[in-house]
Image (cartoon, rainbow, N blue to C red):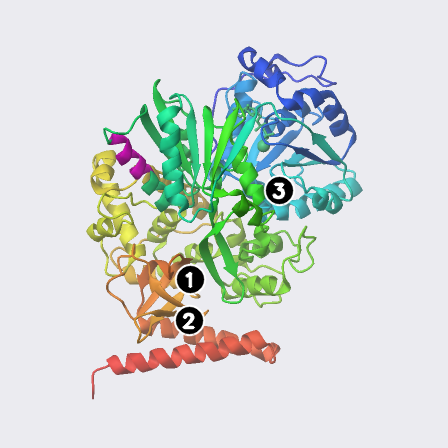
């Protein structure tokens, strides 16, 4: 990972208790002192410091905006409870880790990377004098693979615990084990603090051996919440109307934050707002819109924090990524659609599904909590109070709805058994079984019951990628197409590079310019080739409706992955024009995602037997090839395959036959395993089907 070098001031931290003699580097910046002293948490400071000093593990509960994330780590630092060692505080999202680290550095009158730094995937802003690190939970978990006791930290704070991301869940277990082990081996003691904004913290407390709960009461600013008078069917339209109702009356400096579900919908809303505001009948000041979604690159995500010119209203349209942790300056209004797009994994079909769902009451509170941070705020909900009452209380923890392959891979890399790991909420046995089978299929373990990673598995665990992408990258050497695969994985790891153009919002038309008959993966690659050869990249992007930021971020990811390749001594080979090699290589990780065209013009996904269609954004959408490989299945009005590549049925059959033999071999050790028997039957069917097709295409003798 690249370290950003900054100029550092020397921090003279004294050995003893520094609370009475706080070094100037830890003094609060004058202009912010007033605001900080007025936060609800300030009334609890002495008590909190005392408790944190005494307890090994504690849970801190407080309303959004009371000052948990920004102030508590600073209290620890200023009172040297960390004993000059590092403090790390985790955030489920990159944008929170970066923006809060910058804010806390500012509160200490410093630049980020000095006393306060941050670590996120593909970026590390930590200096030799850093003591307080804001990190994404994923980054800390990857560190634990190399150092399961996390010995460089004396205090670990798991923030936003109520979000229950799968990574935070795993960290609960890893950190509890580290704390016990460090204790029993007389190593540096580890202090653990769990922070949450949701009321139901008993679950955490029980898990952490009845750890005491500290309540921070109060909120500085008022939030008025309004529900729709009647049940809302069209949340998009309701949100749009609400924007212009506010816009007509509120002064320009009062910014609006809208929660919608996904990139396409968000870009459409930005476009609609822009079009309507140009209408001479529209009253209100100028508008500056920002869009925000998870896959966007960190630089464009940070744009939402920049002030707009005087007399202009800022409108931010975001997914649930802005739901927790962050404070966006000037936000006075939140408009909550009540919807969220979430990924859920079906263990039976083995397919990840992206679906729009109603949020939970807890999420609704978090969304409202984005106002009332610097000033009083208002939250308009695009749902009635009856609809609110019908929402589930809290969100289903991610561990119950995600593919556990990455989790099992990480646990195995730490020599932990996924079946006996001390989960805060135990996933279903069949989910763990499936994940181990997938790791076996990917070659990360040598048989589905093995707990030891193969060489490939070890390498896969160190790559910050989905295990299937890691496998593709590690197979690329064999196919002599490492360079091309690095480009494709980097592009798949960033957001949609295609910007909506006026005629078609899903980018189908733009993609035709870079069309490859092989499908979307190679089309993406063609875009990158064109981009690389363009003289003025910004102009080229504008002319082609391509997001410059996304391309830039993809390049950044590729650089990071290249450094990992050199660590693994992978030779960066290129297959030149031979894109067949790339397609074969993609199969090595995505072999479960293959579908065949059926007589009714729908596709049948081989591993799950689900009926699906090619997504309209795919370049293959209109050509209906017989056999395709897809990156993911997405459910909206239909079940769609996204990012699709055309496959040669012969090559697929060969691959399936290989897989069939592997299954047969596994059956010799467990002949009655129903899953394996089923897999064997399914594979046989697919092989027969494709063989027949190939035969029918052969010329007659
Ligand atoms: O973690 P919690 O929700 O309790 O609050 P926080 O993130 O520590 O933020 C506490 C307060 O600091 C917010 O309510 C804002 O008033 C202020 N803050 C800010 O003005 N700008 C930031 N970037 C972060 C926090
Ligand atoms: Mg917080």
Please tell me in which quarter of the rendered image ligand 2 is found.
Answer: top right
Q: Quadrant of residue 683?
A: bottom left
Q: Is residue 19 magenta?
A: no
Q: Find disc 3 in the rendering and name its residue.
A: 162
**Disc 1 to disc 3, C-alpha distance:** 33 Å
Q: Residues within 10 Å of mark 2 (few under 14, many from 20)?
A: some
Q: Residue at x 44, y 66 (%)?
A: 592
Q: Is residue 656 left or right of residue 531?
A: right
Q: Find disc 1 in the rendering and name its residue.
A: 590
Residue 340, numbered circle: none
**Disc 2 to disc 1, C-alpha distance:** 12 Å
Q: Find disc 2 in the rendering and name its residue.
A: 606
Q: Residues within 10 Å of mark 1 (few under 14, many from 20)?
A: some
Tell me residue 38's x, y (percent): 62, 17
Tell me residue 102's x, y (percent): 51, 25
Residue 127 seen from this side: no
The correct choice, above or below, for 485 with respect to 622 in the image is above
Give whichever of 626, 442 is nearer the camera.
626
Residue interval drawn in magenta: 270-278
Callout in the foreground (2, 1) = 2
Label 2: element kind: loop
Of mark 1 and mark 3, the one earlier in the sequence is 3
**Disc 3 to disc 2, C-alpha distance:** 37 Å
Label 3: element kind: helix
Q: Residue at x 42, y 26 (%)?
A: 255
Q: Residue at x 37, y 66 (%)?
A: 612
Q: Residue at x 51, y 58 (%)?
A: 345
- Decide: marks 3, 2 in contact (CB < 8 A)? no
Q: Residues within 10 Å of mark 3 (few under 14, many from 20)?
A: many
């Amino acid at each position: 990972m690249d370290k950003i070098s900054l100029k550092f001031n020397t921090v003279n931290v004294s050995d003893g208790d520094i609370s009475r003699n706080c070094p100037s580097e830890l003094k609060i910046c004058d202009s912010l002192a007033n605001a900080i002293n007025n936060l609800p948490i300030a009334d609890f400071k002495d008590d909190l410091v005392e408790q944190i000093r005494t307890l090994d593990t504690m849970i801190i509960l407080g309303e959004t905006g009371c000052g948990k994330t920004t102030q508590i780590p600073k209290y620890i630092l200023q009172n040297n409870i960390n004993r000059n060692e590092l403090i790390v505080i985790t955030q489920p999202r990159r944008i929170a880790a970066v923006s809060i680290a910058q804010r806390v550095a500012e509160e200490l009158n410093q630049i980020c990377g000095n006393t306060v730094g941050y670590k996120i995937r593909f970026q590390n802003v930590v200096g030799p004098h850093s003591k307080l690190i804001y990190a994404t939970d994923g980054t800390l978990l990857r560190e634990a693979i190399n150092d399961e006791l996390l010995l460089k930290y004396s205090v670990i704070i798991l923030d936003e615990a109520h979000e229950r991301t799968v990574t935070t869940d795993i960290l609960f277990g890893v950190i509890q084990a580290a704390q016990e082990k460090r204790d029993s081996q007389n190593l540096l003691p580890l202090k653990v603090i769990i922070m949450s904004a949701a009321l139901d913290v008993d679950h955490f407390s029980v898990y952490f051996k009845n750890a005491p709960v500290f309540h921070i009461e109060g909120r500085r600013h008022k939030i008025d919440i309004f529900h729709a008078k009647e049940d809302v069917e069209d949340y998009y339209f309701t949100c749009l109307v609400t924007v212009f109702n506010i816009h007509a009356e509120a002064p320009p400096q009062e910014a609006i934050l809208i929660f919608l579900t996904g990139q396409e919908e968000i870009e459409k809303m930005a476009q609609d707002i822009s079009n309507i505001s140009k209408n001479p009948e529209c009253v209100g000041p100028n508008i500056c819109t920002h869009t925000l979604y998870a896959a966007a690159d960190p630089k464009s995500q940070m744009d939402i924090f920049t002030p707009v010119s005087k007399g202009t209203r800022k409108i931010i349209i975001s997914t649930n990524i802005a739901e927790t942790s962050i404070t966006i300056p000037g936000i006075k209004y939140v408009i909550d659609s009540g919807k969220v797009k979430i990924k859920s994994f079906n263990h039976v079909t083995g397919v990840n599904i992206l679906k729009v769902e109603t949020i939970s009451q807890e999420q609704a509170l978090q969304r409202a909590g984005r106002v009332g941070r610097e000033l009083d705020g208002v939250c308009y909900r695009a749902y009635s109070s009856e609809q609110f009452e019908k929402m589930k209380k809290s969100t289903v923890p991610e561990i119950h709805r995600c593919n556990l392959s990455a989790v099992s891979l990480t646990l195995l890399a730490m020599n932990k058994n996924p079946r006996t790991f001390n989960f805060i909420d135990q996933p279903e046995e069949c989910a763990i079984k499936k994940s181990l089978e997938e790791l076996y299929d990917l070659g990360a373990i040598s048989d589905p019951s093995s707990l030891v990673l193969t060489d490939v598995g070890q390498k896969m665990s160190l790559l910050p990628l989905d295990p299937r992408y890691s496998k593709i990258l590690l197979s690329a050497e064999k196919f002599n197409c490492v360079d091309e695969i690095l480009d494709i994985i980097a592009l798949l790891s960033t957001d949609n590079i295609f910007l909506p153009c006026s005629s078609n919002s899903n980018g189908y038309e733009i993609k035709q310019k870079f069309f490859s008959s092989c499908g979307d993966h190679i089309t993406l690659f063609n875009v990158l080739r064109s981009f690389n050869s363009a003289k003025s990249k910004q102009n080229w992007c504008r002319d082609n409706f391509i997001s410059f930021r996304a391309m830039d971020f993809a390049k950044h990811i590729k650089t990071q992955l290249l450094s990992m390749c050199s660590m693994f001594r992978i030779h960066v080979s290129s297959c030149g024009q031979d894109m067949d090699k790339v397609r074969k290589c993609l199969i090595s990780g995505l072999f479960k995602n293959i579908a065949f065209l059926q007589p009714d013009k729908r596709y049948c996904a081989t591993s799950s037997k689900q009926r699906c269609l090619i997504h309209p954004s795919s370049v293959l959408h209109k050509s209906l090839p017989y056999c395709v490989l897809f990156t993911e299945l997405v459910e909206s009005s239909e079940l769609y395959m996204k990012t699709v590549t055309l496959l040669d049925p012969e090559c697929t059959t060969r691959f399936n036959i290989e897989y069939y033999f592997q299954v047969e071999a596994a059956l010799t050790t467990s002949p009655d395993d129903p899953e394996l028997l089923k897999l064997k039957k399914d594979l046989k069917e697919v092989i027969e089907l494709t063989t027949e097709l190939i035969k029918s295409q052969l010329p007659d003798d």
